[in-house]
Image: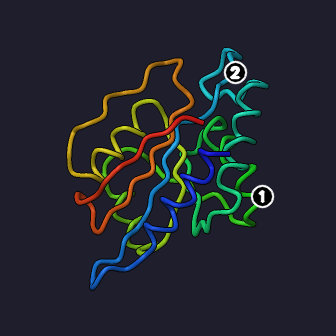
Amino acid sequence: MKKILILLVLISLSTISYGQDTLTTFILVRHAEKANDGTNNPGLTAEGQERANRLNELLKAAEIAAIYSTPFKRTMKTVEPLSLEKGLDIIEYNPRGQDFISEMYNNNKGKTVVVSGHSNTTPFVVNLLIGSKKYEMLSEDEYDKIFVVTISEIGKGTVTVMSY
């Protein structure tokens, strides 16, 4: 409960405009626990589905403008409960390159978006948003991190890291 309150306070504070700087919030997560089905595109394990439901509970009261995911089953399934709760389509993005970050930002200035990615792409995006190479690739068994990044523009931001 305490984590939910802290997250909601962070999100609500991040949507306040200061002078001419409008703050935009990115909530970034790595996909939940993936199944080991022998394919290149596995879904989630039962534990992963539980984590996806916890993410939904955590963000249920937040004002979310958009939900983004890479086109893989595991990333889509991680944000699917939130998508259904909010009545928002999941917008696919290609994590190769950096154009998708500018597009997300330009389409959602002053709002809050959720981004579902991978062990390598999530820290990469956080680093680009804050303008500092602070975070390394997540370990293969690390599924519980949530990065709340608030920016006034790409490369100028702060980040809060929590577990869920």
The three-letter amino acid code for the residue at tag 2 is: Ala
Name the quadrant of the C terminus. Answer: top right
Residue 49 position, x and y percent, is 75, 33
Labels 1 and 2: the sequence-earlier one: 2
- The residue at the point 20 percent across, 45 percent down is 132
Residue beneath disc 1: 84
Mark in front: 1 vs 2: 1
- The residue at the point 42 percent across, 26 percent down is 138
Give the camera-side residue of 93 and 17. Answer: 17
Q: Residue furthest bottom?
A: 19
The three-letter amino acid code for the residue at tag 1 is: Leu
Give the camera-side residue of 5 and 76. Answer: 5
Q: How many marks?
A: 2
Residue 87 position, x and y percent, is 75, 66
Relative placement, left or right, of 81 versus 11 is right
Distance from the alpha carbon under mark 1 to that under mark 2: 22 Å
Give the camera-side residue of 72 and 134. Answer: 134
Residue 22 position, x and y percent, is 35, 77
Q: Secondary structure at mark 1?
A: helix
Give the camera-side residue of 157 and 41. Answer: 157
Residue 116 position, x and y percent, is 54, 45
The answer to whether residue 145 is above or below residue 19 is above
Q: Which mark is residue 35?
A: 2
Name the quadrant of the N terminus. Answer: top right
- The residue at the point 48 percent across, 71 percent down is 111
- The residue at the point 66 percent across, 44 percent down is 55
